Image (cartoon, rainbow, N blue to C red):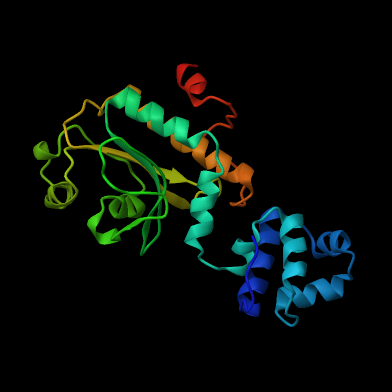
Amino acid sequence: MLFAPPFMYDTQTIAKNIRNARLYRNYSQDYIALKLNISQNAYSKVELGYTKPTLDRISRIAAVLGFEVIKLIGVNNMLAEVEAVNRIAMVPKILEIICRTTGMGFAAVARVTEDRWIACSVRDEILFGLKPGDELKLETTICNEIRQSGRAVIMDEVGNNDSPLYRKTAAMYGFQSYISMPIFLQDGSFFGTLCAIDPKPAKINNTRVIEMFKLFADLISFHLNLEGYYHSEAFVGCKKIEVSDPLTALEA
């Protein structure tokens, strides 16, 4: 990712992130220094925060570690995260399959943090009005609860649910059926949700639909890792699956 000057970044934050990334990869300082063609002492000064690395040096370190530069710098760039999802060619097909299979008119991949909800990729057949990059107030969404609990929320008909929060959210956004599956990155951290809504009730609280959403959430996580945006190569509770057509995986 390119940064337009002037771009400010914190040396101590970078030093800490680089060190943590190296330890995560189980690489030695000598190994990284060798790859960078510098001395171990020079590299050590980077990790200690004694030397402020240039963006070129950070980029080279990121390449050795298999990290996105932005993750080492520590900038919370939501636009980059939207772009990362949109580089996954199969996501539009996943959203199409969700709408076709469930009969629901809106499906999306959302990035959810402790203070923001942003649409990354959207299929909107009900004119809900959201586009990639658009945001909702986090506190008005059910996804905020999913971020905190790490558990999916599935409702065939919100009117039959006892939760005041769910009823309030449904009334605000005009939906009756709702499903949202958490997306966990390969290092186990929470990325966001794969969700669908519709103004009509839908039969979605069943094993077939839930397993489909789990599979697709895992596929999105896997391909984010292939993009190099997220750093772990270890899977957390999911298989390594690589298919060109997600419908093939669903029918397997």
Of all residues, the one furthest to the top in this rendering is 252
Residue 132 shows in the view? yes
Q: x, y percentage for residue 246?
A: 50, 26
Q: Nearer the viewer, residue 89 or 201?
A: 89
Residue at 37% in and 62% down = 114
* Percent coordinates x, y for residue 1 in the rendering: 64, 60
Say left or right for 184 vs 181.
right
Q: Tell me which corner region of the image, top left, top right, bottom left or bottom right, holds residue 175.
A: top left
Q: Is residue 236 visible?
A: no
Whether 100 is drawn above or below 138: the answer is above
Q: How many labels were placed on the picture?
A: 0
Viewer-proximal residue among 61 and 78:
78
The quarter of the picture where residue 28 lies is bottom right
Q: Would residue 102 be found to the left or right of residue 77 on screen?
A: left
**Left/right of residue 214 with respect to residue 50 in the rendered view:** left
Residue 182's place in the image compared with 238, above or below, is below
Q: Is residue 139 left or right of residue 249?
A: left
Residue 163 location in percent, x, y? 13, 47
Observer-nearest of 8 and 33: 8
- How far across and down, in percent of the image, does residue 10 sit? 61, 78
Q: Please give the name of the residue rendered at 61% of the width and 63% of the height, measured from the top-left corner.
A: 70
Residue pictured at 17% horizontal, 48% vertical: 166
